[in-house]
Amino acid sequence: MLKDRIEKHLKEQPTEIFKEEKEFAEKHHLLSDGNVIEIKNPDTRFLDAYIERGDKETEEVLSKETAEFLNQPIKYFKNHKNEFMYLESKWFDLVGADAISFETDAVFGNYEVMLGLKLPKKAETAIKTYIKENTLTSTPKYSLMFSQQDGLWDLNFSLNDLEGFTEDLSIYDAYQSIYQFLFNLVSVVEGNRNN
């Protein structure tokens, strides 16, 4: 659960916290009294991420990238439609998401996000409700399928449907937006389950 993972993170790295995690920790009384927690600059969240660019057709790794690559505009993927990006980060682990893949859809030109999400199978209705209520269109473009083999939800959705989306986003800003969306989704779904 998100609460357990944040509590563990605070014990192991109490000074490494961002706005979303701090607000969650305060709401769930996970912070020790008297501890002054300084919020880290959100621009540093993915500095230590593992990043690869790959070929969509062959899934061959084209290049391993540094965090500097994240400064590129997301339009990079419109100009390189044969590529996708794969990013692993401890921050996505924190919300129960495995690595996040990102690419441009060849047919519609939408920016697509693909991941596995650790939520129980019975959370399907809550996940779908959250997506419908927290995206910009009345019919958001997404697919959701539970994998019995992995025990994960395979979730694909369009970045274009998230609040704040513009073609001018950097890849970093896109991943920050994806993180916030997933953090809130998991927080709401698990919160509803516990009520």
Image (cartoon, helix red, strand yellow):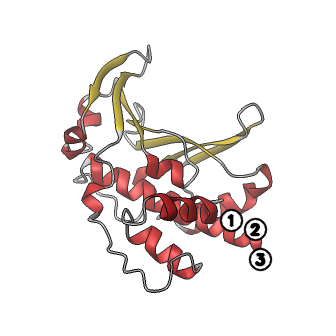
> SS at mark 1?
helix
> SS at mark 3?
loop
Q: Which residue in the protein does label 1 denote?
A: 190
Q: Distance between the residues labelled 3 and 1?
A: 9 Å
Mark 3 vs 1, N-terminal side: 1
User: Residue at image x 65%, y 48%?
Assistant: 118
Image marks 1 and 2: residues in contact by CB distance under 8 Å: yes
User: Residue at image x 44%, y 62%?
Assistant: 180
Q: Which residue in the protein does label 2 denote?
A: 193
Residue type, mark 2 in image: Arg
Q: Determine whether 33 is above or below 144 in the image.
A: below
Q: How far apart are marks 3 and 2 (CA)?
A: 6 Å
Across and down, in percent, residue 148 comes to 78, 35
| The label number, if any, that marks residue 14 in the structure image | none
Front in this rendered view, residue 55 or 138: 55
Residue 40 picture quarter: bottom left
Image marks 3 and 2: residues in contact by CB distance under 8 Å: yes
| The label number, if any, that marks residue 195 in the structure image | 3
